[in-house]
Image (tube, rainbow, N blue to C red):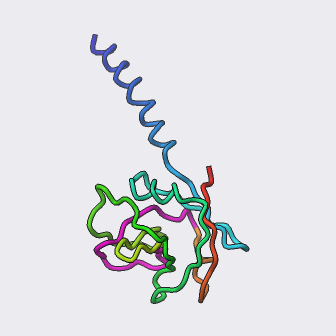
Amino acid sequence: MIRHFLIAAFSVLLPAAAFAEDTKMHVTFDLGHTTLFATLDDTPAARDFAAMLPLTLTLSDYHGIEKVADLGKRLDSTGMPASYTPQAGDITQYAPWKNLALFLKPFQNSNGLVRLGQFDGDFSALHQPGEIEVTISAAD
């Protein structure tokens, strides 16, 4: 009897785990000469951002720590922490200014910063000075 219960429980749990893995959204950042790959988190803010894609933005430097661009709206941060400590390679929104913020270096915990996801591997193409035009698209 216990064996049948365990088999039934695992048969219910396994498809849910597989489905959760499939809900990850993969995106590309096309810089013209380079394409960067990233994975968005499964959060309301990341889903709200993904719904805006494809999106072409002009990124500018912000204190040598991040590249930023105006998204024109605050993303849905329902259930998200009030602050976040970004790491190099994090994709975030600074909600008070409605900015997309791509972190080149780690930074301090910041109120209003909402994590959206992270780059998969090398993102050094963003380390160039000045403005960069980027097109962000769904990769799936």
The magenta stretch is: 101-121
Vertical comparison of 76 with 31: above or below: above
The question of residue 2 being in magenta is answered with: no
Tell me which residue sits at (40%, 62%) in the image. Answer: 75
The answer to which of 1 and 80 lies nearer the viewer is 80
- Residue 4: give x, y in percent of width and height: 34, 13
Tell me which residue sits at (34%, 23%) in the image. Answer: 9
Tell me which residue sits at (41%, 73%) in the image. Answer: 98
- Residue 86: give x, y in percent of width and height: 38, 72
- The image quadrant of residue 128 is bottom right
Q: Residue furthest right?
A: 33
Screen quadrant of the N terminus: top left
- The image quadrant of residue 73 is bottom left
The question of residue 102 being in magenta is answered with: yes
Tell me which residue sits at (36%, 66%) in the image. Answer: 114
Vertical comparison of 49 with 70: above or below: above
- Residue 49: give x, y in percent of width and height: 48, 60
Vertical comparison of 12 with 35: above or below: above
The answer to which of 126 and 55 lies nearer the viewer is 55
